[in-house]
Image (spheres, rainbow, N blue to C red):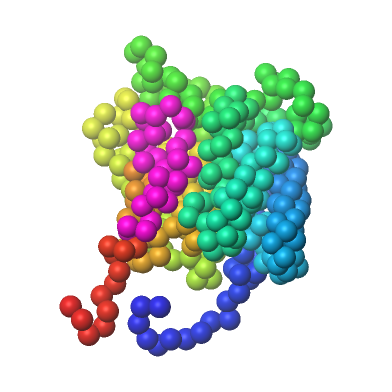
Amino acid sequence: MIHSPYVRKPVSVQRTMGLVLIALLPGIAAYVWQAGPAILVNLLIATVVAVLAEALVMHLRQRSIGLAVADLSAVLTAWLVALSLPAIAPWWLTTCAVLVAILAVKHLYGGLGQNPFNPAMVAYCTMIVAFPALMSQWPTLASTGLDDQLALILGGARELDAITGATALDSLRTGLRAAGATVESVARGPAFGVFGSQGWEWVAAGYALGGLFLLAKGIITWHMPVAFIVALGGTAGVFWLIDPTHYASPLFHLASGGAMLAAFFIVTDPVSGATTPRGKLLFAAGVGLIVWLIRNFGAFPDGIAFAVLLMNICVPLLDMKTQPRVFGHR
């Protein structure tokens, strides 16, 4: 705490994690509405794997299994991993990603509160580097049937032409590299909606609604969401005003991909992110800037995970250099 009065609030890890899980529900509901119920299957798979992995590690470490599982931290990590992966990712891909997040990132560094890197983002980066083709298979709006999606998740058959399509970010990145292509010409494709990816604007709105809930409950502060949105939207806006034919609008960047999920649920991770007020602003702004750079000049359509991990490396320096002034001292 920075200054008095020092009022102790009845806050527990379980309550905090539970409120974050509740805040994710509007985004998940919009996800199901737009892309079908496959995401619920992968959320269930991820949750079961995360809880079992957490229990196994705590048993090996001779710690209380009940307390570790009941604090809901493993469940929240599982949900963030599943929401970062394509909804129709095969079950083994989701399982591997969750095991990386829980075993290699969380417990390898000592468990809850010790990991220097965001577990969900490390899992995402590992999977996209190891299985780039599977990580690019996102369901289209027409693929709302559970049977086909369940077959892709559990059966391993990858008959994808009728059920998947390129995202708006991927279409834009690929299209702008073609000779003579402009943002306007590429945006006529079926992947584009009013502001971002077709239909995914609703998912972004759901995550934003959940983020506002967390702000109202005091679970997160305004620093990181505002800094991320201003940095990503502001950078995109400057280049869009300079050359709108080759740079997408700020609304497109904020309503596409995982921007809103990142703004309220990823960069706000209290363990791997900065902790001082100025440090939070610099951390989230750095993530937003790097995301825009990767989206426009990088090899991946969306660079949120890589941006978060790069800024995780800077957290010790940010916290050291942005300590608030001690009362009574210059």
Say which of 185 and 218 sits in front.
218
Residue for point 58% across, 81% down? 10
The N terminus, quarter of image: bottom left
Residue 70 visible: no
Out of 21 and 131, give the one closest to the viewer: 131
Q: Is residue 107 above or below residue 15?
A: above
Q: Residue furthest left?
A: 330
Residue positioned 75% across, 55% down in the render: 56
Query: In which quadrant of the rendered view does residue 157 lie?
Result: top right
Magenta stretch contains residue 311: yes
> In the figure, is residue 259 to the left or right of 279?
right
Q: Residue at x 38, y 56 (%)?
A: 315
Q: Residue furthest top?
A: 179
The quarter of the rendered structure image containing the C terminus is: bottom left
The magenta-colored residue range is 290-318
Is residue 259 visible in the rendered image? The answer is yes
Front residue of this view, candidates 196 and 314: 314
Magenta segment main secondary structure: helix
Q: Is residue 188 left or right of residue 74?
A: left
Q: Position of residue 217 (x, y in %)?
A: 53, 71
Residue 237 x, y percent position in the rendering: 30, 40
- Give the side of residue 242 with respect to residue 154, left or right: left
**Residue drawn at the location 49% of the way across and 27% of the way down:** 170
> Measured from the top left, where is residue 141 in percent x and y?
64, 32
Q: Is residue 110 left or right of residue 50?
A: left
Please check the rendered image and state whether residue 140 is part of the magenta-colored stretch, yes or no: no
User: 43 above or below 214?
Assistant: above
Q: Is residue 248 above or below residue 213?
A: above
